[in-house]
């Protein structure tokens, strides 16, 4: 081999050896650095059996529950009621909220009393002829366990159920234990505040549309602010979450109701839920509930998206059934941190006959105030409308701070 070639080969070999040594040195340094720890998984209160089972031993128990009331295991999940029974807890009664204990009823559809075929336990509906447990229904119970996954929106009726159950417990001297769960919309507070004169089952208190609290925190507020009937206070115990903050992103492994099928529907629900007070379809009767909106009476030339609602699981009689609805597809929306009026303003502005748009009484119940409808009809922008909420939101946040359990 020529001398020049041998020199080149030697230089190349030395270069490769030096590079290899440097790489090994880098690996050694990296190996010595502390590994970045992944955040610990959120543990729902129902999983913390050691904290609440001792409170139930030797007592007759009533449970307020629905399909989300589960204990998570590596191989899946088990319903809270089944877990309590297998642990020897004397469960006497199940109370079912809107959509029922097994979660098959439509929104707004009355839920009937009955019996759970899996356990043989009697089921008392809290979304039928009565929405508050009666003294007779609580008569033989020593304690109530409340465990329902919420989504943090005022007109989502599970917080109303919580309040009425707490009122019944306070009136009958029955302790209540709330097993806390994450609020997927718990990272912000926003929207119009309920006016006292318009309170009802879609909002029993003067709170914003999105209130940024877990069920446990809200239960403490109900007690602390004297919002239960006659200012009574329930004998309340909150079993807390572990590894949760209000900034935590939480994927709901079980849909909290038939028409909130995924994370996108839940993040859009505070804004699109207001369409429930209009004649516009918000995805019911499709597989994209609360991820789109549209109506046959909206201007077809303004949109390049359309769909046809048909009866399906959770929506026997959807708005605009069988009609071509023109509107917008929002199924690619990422996690939101505010309530926006952009979409409802868009739909109103593109409605050909404005008299067909609002269901005035229903819209006021959802918005909590008649002012929002007037603001939209008067042509106010999203930014102008949102500015009118701010003073009320700041007042609520100061009250809210007193009852927060999590950062």
Image: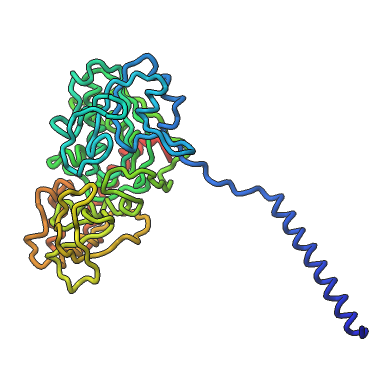
Quarter of the picture containing the C terminus is top left
The colour scheme used here is: rainbow
On-image quarter of the N terminus: bottom right
Classify 86 as above or below 215. above
Residue furthest to the top in view is: 58
**Could you say where residue 339 lies in the image, as x and y percent from the top left?**
28, 54
Figure disc tally: 0
Q: Residue drawn at (58%, 46%), measured in percent from left and top?
A: 37
Q: Is residue 380 visible?
A: no
Q: Quadrant of residue 328?
A: bottom left
- The residue that appears at 18% across and 74% down in the rendered structure is 301
One can see residue 239 in this view: yes
**Residue at 34 percent of width and 54 percent of height:** 264
Quadrant in the rendering for residue 98:
top left
Q: Where is 250 relative to 66, above or below?
A: below
Q: Between residues 168 and 107, which one lies in front from this camera angle?
A: 107
Quadrant in which residue 310 is drawn? bottom left
Picture coordinates of residue 215 (x, y %)?
33, 36
Asked whether, in this view, residue 37 is left or right of residue 155, the answer is right
Q: In the image, residue 85 lies at what x, y percent?
A: 37, 23
Q: Please state which of residues 90 and 226 is positioned toward the viewer in this rendering.
A: 90
Residue pictured at 90% horizontal, 85% vertical: 4
């Amino acid at each position: 081999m020529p001398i020049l070639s041998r020199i080149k080969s030697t230089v190349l070999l030395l270069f490769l050896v030096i590079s290899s040594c440097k790489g090994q040195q880098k690996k050694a340094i990296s190996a010595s650095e502390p590994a970045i720890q992944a955040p610990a998984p959120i543990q729902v209160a129902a999983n913390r059996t050691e904290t609440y089972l001792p409170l139930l031993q030797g007592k007759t128990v009533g449970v307020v529950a629905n399909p989300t009331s589960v204990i998570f295991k590596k191989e899946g999940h088990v319903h809270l009621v089944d877990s309590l029974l297998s642990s020897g807890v004397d469960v006497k009664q199940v109370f079912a909220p809107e959509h029922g204990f097994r979660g098959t009823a439509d929104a707004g559809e009355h839920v009937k009393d009955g019996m759970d075929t899996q356990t043989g336990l009697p089921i008392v509906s809290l979304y039928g002829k009565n929405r508050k447990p009666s003294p007779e229904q609580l008569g033989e119970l020593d304690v109530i366990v409340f465990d329902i996954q919420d989504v943090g929106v005022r007109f989502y009726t599970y917080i109303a159920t919580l309040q009425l159950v707490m009122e019944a417990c306070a009136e009958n001297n029955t302790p209540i234990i709330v097993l806390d769960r994450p609020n997927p919309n718990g990272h912000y507070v926003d929207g119009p505040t309920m006016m006292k004169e318009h309170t009802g089952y879609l909002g029993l208190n003067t709170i914003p549309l999105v209130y940024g609290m877990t069920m446990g925190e809200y239960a403490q507020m109900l007690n602390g602010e004297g919002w239960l009937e006659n200012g009574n206070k329930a004998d309340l115990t909150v079993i807390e979450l572990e590894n949760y903050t209000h900034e935590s992103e939480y994927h709901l492994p079980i849909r909290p109701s038939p028409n909130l099928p995924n994370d996108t529907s839940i993040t859009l629900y505070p804004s699109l839920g207001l369409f429930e007070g209009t004649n516009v379809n918000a995805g019911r009767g499709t597989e994209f509930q609360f991820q789109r909106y549209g109506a046959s009476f909206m201007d077809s030339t303004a949109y390049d998206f359309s769909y046809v609602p048909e009866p399906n699981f959770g929506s026997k009689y959807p708005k605009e059934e069988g009609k071509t609805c023109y509107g917008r597809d929002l199924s690619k929306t990422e996690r939101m941190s505010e309530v926006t009026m952009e979409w409802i303003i868009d739909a109103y502005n593109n409605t050909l006959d404005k008299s067909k748009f609002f269901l005035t009484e229903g819209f006021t119940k959802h918005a909590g105030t008649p002012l929002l409808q007037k603001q939209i009809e008067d042509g106010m922008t999203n930014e102008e409308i949102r500015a009118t909420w701010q003073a009320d939101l700041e007042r609520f946040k100061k009250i809210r701070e007193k009852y927060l359990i999590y950062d």
